[in-house]
Image (tube, rainbow, N blue to C red):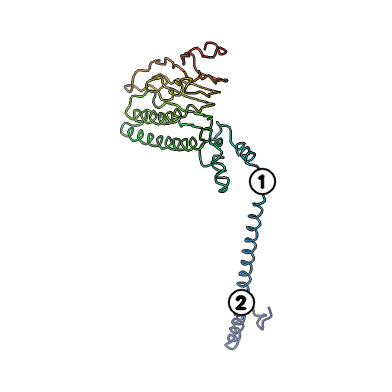
């Protein structure tokens, strides 16, 4: 920019009093220009913001009207139901966990119409996955902290059980009268054999929690169509809760068509031996009598268990032969 002082800029020149007054006037003139430019910038930014708002409003208008003519809205209910059911994962997958990320829940949150449609499609809720975390009963805590550790572990386990119980209740209610596919993986290991006080706290918590879930499943046993159980069961039948799933009669499971049962017996001898703590380990597994696999509708059976882990009756359908 032109200035009467251009030749003196960036130098050691010292202006006179008259020149100082002139320089101040030049500075004020440029400050006024900057103020004018700032006002123009503010006006342009306001105009730009208004244009962006109009653009956004028009995009929302377009998107919402495009949604009205989306092809999926024209699908017949039976095809839409098939699409929804195809979104369900394999029952053993982590995605099948009954959480807010489950496909049935996600579908029900898309819009009001899909929510109602999801609730009116009970097959979406007919797959029950129960994976119960194992409670580690470690015997090497200091005695003064053992009770606290046991109580904290029990409280955490109880919260997990309550979440699974609540989710299962919702799924069972929404599945209405549909046949059920159930996958349950659980262990009674914390109930297996330490005699210390803190292990007793965990044992009671584990058995009570598992009993709560088992009772809920048993209340709907007449709807079992397919079951997949992976169970680690303690040898004491009178204390075991998971073994209750195997004591059903054919009348209890009238439509059970497919069963896959994996049993891992928990022996007291498998627990770490701590001198002076708990009973002397012994081989106390006598097996269990399984009635669930005698369902008259049963067409497929997979049974995996150690030798002598079960005391099987002769299956009622002659084509299976003796077990």
- The mark tally for this picture is 2
Residue 147: x and y in percent read 32, 33
Q: State which quarter of the image contains the N terminus.
A: bottom right
In percent of width and height, residue 110 lies at 57, 47
- The structure residue drawn at horizontal position 39% and vertical position 28%, both measured from the top left corner, is 207
Picture layout, residue 13 above or below residue 71? below
* 95 sits to left or right of 275: right
Tag on residue 34? 2
Q: Image quarter for residue 41?
A: bottom right
Packing grade of label 1 (10 A; few <14, some 14-19, many >=20) is few
Instruction: Look at discs 2 and 1 and give the one toward the viewer.
Output: 1
The residue furthest top is 322
Residue occupied by mark 1: 74
In the picture, residue 108 is in which quadrant?
Answer: top right
On the rendered structure, is 44 left or right of 275? right
Q: Secondary structure at mark 1?
A: helix
Tell which of 240 and 30 is nearer to you.
Answer: 240
Element on which disc 2 rests: helix
In the displayed structure, does residue 101 sit left or right of residue 216? Answer: right
Seen at 31% across and 31% down, the residue is 143
Q: Percent position (x, y) of residue 216?
A: 44, 31
Q: Position of residue 7 (x, y in %)?
A: 67, 80
Label 2 Cα crowd, 10 Å radius (few <14 / some 14-19 / many 20+): few
């Amino acid at each position: 920019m032109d200035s009467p002082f251009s030749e003196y800029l960036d130098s050691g020149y010292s202006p006179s009093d008259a020149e100082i007054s002139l320089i101040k006037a030049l500075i004020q003139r440029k400050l006024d220009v900057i103020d004018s430019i700032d006002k123009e910038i503010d006006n342009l930014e306001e105009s730009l913001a208004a244009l962006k708002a109009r653009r956004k409003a028009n995009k929302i208008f377009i998107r919402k009207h495009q949604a009205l003519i989306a092809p999926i809205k024209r699908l017949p209910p039976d095809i839409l139901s098939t699409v929804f059911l195809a979104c369900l994962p394999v029952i053993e997958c982590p995605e099948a966990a009954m959480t807010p990320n489950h496909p049935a829940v996600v579908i029900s949150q898309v819009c009001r119409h899909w929510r109602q449609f999801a609730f009116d499609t009970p097959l979406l809720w007919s797959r029950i996955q129960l994976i119960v975390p194992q409670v580690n009963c470690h015997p090497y805590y200091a005695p003064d902290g053992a009770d606290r550790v046991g109580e904290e572990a029990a409280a955490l386990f109880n919260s997990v059980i309550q979440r699974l119980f609540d989710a299962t209740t919702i799924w069972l209610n929404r599945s209405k009268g549909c046949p059920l596919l159930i996958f349950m993986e659980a262990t009674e290991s914390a109930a297996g054999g330490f005699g210390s006080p803190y292990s007793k706290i965990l044992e009671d918590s584990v058995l009570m929690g598992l009993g709560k879930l088992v009772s809920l499943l048993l209340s709907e046993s007449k709807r079992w169509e397919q079951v997949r159980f992976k169970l680690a069961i303690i040898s004491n039948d009178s204390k075991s809760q998971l073994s209750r799933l195997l004591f059903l009669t054919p009348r209890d499971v009238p439509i059970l068509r497919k069963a896959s049962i994996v049993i891992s017996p928990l022996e007291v001898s498998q627990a770490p031996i701590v001198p002076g703590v708990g009973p002397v380990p012994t081989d106390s597994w006598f097996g269990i009598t399984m009635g669930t696999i005698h369902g008259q509708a049963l067409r497929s059976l997979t049974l995996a268990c150690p030798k002598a882990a079960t005391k099987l009756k002769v299956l009622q359908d002659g084509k299976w032969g003796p077990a």
